[in-house]
Amino acid sequence: MRDIVYFDLETRHSAAEVGGWHNTAEMRMSVGVTYSTASGKYAIYSEEMVDDLITQLRQADLVVGYNHEHFDYGVLQRYTMWNMADITNNLDLCRDIEQRGGVRVKLDSVAAASIGSSKTAVGTQALKWWADYVKTGNVELLMDIARYCCFDVKVTRDVHWYGAEHGFIRYDDKKGGTVELPVDWKL
């Protein structure tokens, strides 16, 4: 069975805190999450477990994420000497949609229009949970980050599965309408 690994991570710091989006490696990972089709299970990784995360991504037949090649791999770059995009087989849904449709679309927009689902929070909330965890040591805050990240992985997986099954995805345009975009994603 082909192992498709769906992937997302959350960071400890915002772009503003590290001097801009060009410093993604300085944002550091708070939590990383994968879902593997081979195991049918989610895995949650702390920064201390990042080597295991990188190994899973390297061994996957396909890594699917949303803007993961640019952002998430940029964050992981601090933890490895390899260029993650070069050592993994990837389908970046954000990049693919942008190349096909000529417009950059948020995951929430694609999820709402395609599968009737949306994200449970925004990335800035995950940053707040991390800051509160650092102040208080309350492990439940780490679980909040992990649950949020798991749900983003689930939404990414479900959008990919929808596109693979139907041959198109939908997203909301800026005029209040919906765009249907053909895709040739495979499972």
Image (cartoon, grey):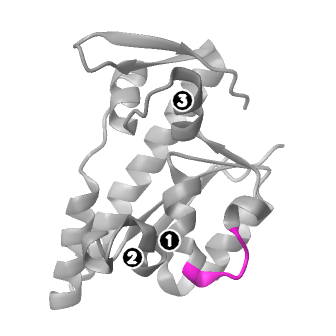
* Residue with the mark numbered 1: 75
Q: Disc 1 on helix, strand or loop?
A: helix
Residue sitting at x 65%, y 23%: 164
Q: Quadrant of residue 116?
A: top left
Q: Quadrant of the C terminus?
A: top right
The answer to whether 100 is drawn above or below residue 120 in the figure is above
Magenta-highlighted residues: 78-83
Instruction: Check residue 88 in the rendering and tell me which mark sits there, or answer none.
Output: none
For marks 2 and 3, give the CA distance: 26 Å
Find disc 3 in the rendering and name its residue. Answer: 97
Give residue 51's position: percent from left, percent from top.
65, 81
**Residue 137 painted magenta:** no
Left or right: where 77 falls relative to 32: right
Residue depicted at x 47% and y 44%: 154
Q: Residues within 10 Å of mark 2 (few under 14, many from 20)?
A: many
Spot occupied by residue 175 in the image (x, y as percentages of width and height): 23, 14
Circle 1: residue type = Val
